[in-house]
Amino acid sequence: MRLLRTSYAERLARAFRPEDFATVFADADQFPLFAPSIESIHSVLTPLRTPDRAVG
């Protein structure tokens, strides 16, 4: 799990809100007192601006 958290999970940090990311990739050995529902987590889409293409 640690390898997943340090490599692949870093790439997903931009896909979720920070609090949702923390919930999904929380330490399995430490249970939070008031954990949010996994079903309420959704990915965040941030569209990237693309340069206008020259019509030629």
Image (cartoon, rainbow, N blue to C red):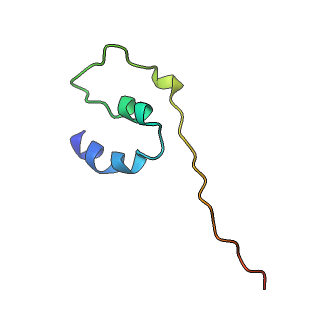
Count of all numbered marks drawn on residues in the image = 0
Residue 28 shown left or right of residue 18 in the figure: left
The quadrant where residue 50 appears: bottom right
Viewer-proximal residue among 18 and 2: 18
Vertical comparison of 13 with 40: above or below: below
- Percent position (x, y) of residue 36? 43, 20
Foreground residue among 4 and 56: 56
Relative to the observer, which residue lies in front, 18 or 8? 18
Q: Which residue ends up furthest to the right in the rendered image?
A: 56
In the rendered image, which quarter contains the C terminus?
bottom right
Q: Position of residue 19 (x, y in %)?
A: 41, 31
Farthest residue toward the bottom? 56
Task: Report which quarter residue 51 is drawn in.
Answer: bottom right
Q: Quadrant of the N terminus?
A: top left
Q: Position of residue 33 (x, y in %)?
A: 31, 13
- Is 19 placed left or right of 49 in the picture? left
Instruction: Residue at 37%, 14% (x, y): give it.
Output: 34
Q: What residue is at 51 percent from the left and 24 percent from the top? A: 39
Up-down relation of residue 23 to residue 36 (above or below): below
Question: Is 56 displayed left or right of 36 in the figure?
Answer: right
Furthest residue to the top? 33
Measuring from the top left, give residue 16's x and y in whole percent: 47, 39
Say above or below: 8 vs 53: above
Relative horizontal placement of residue 56, taking residue 12 as reference (left or right): right
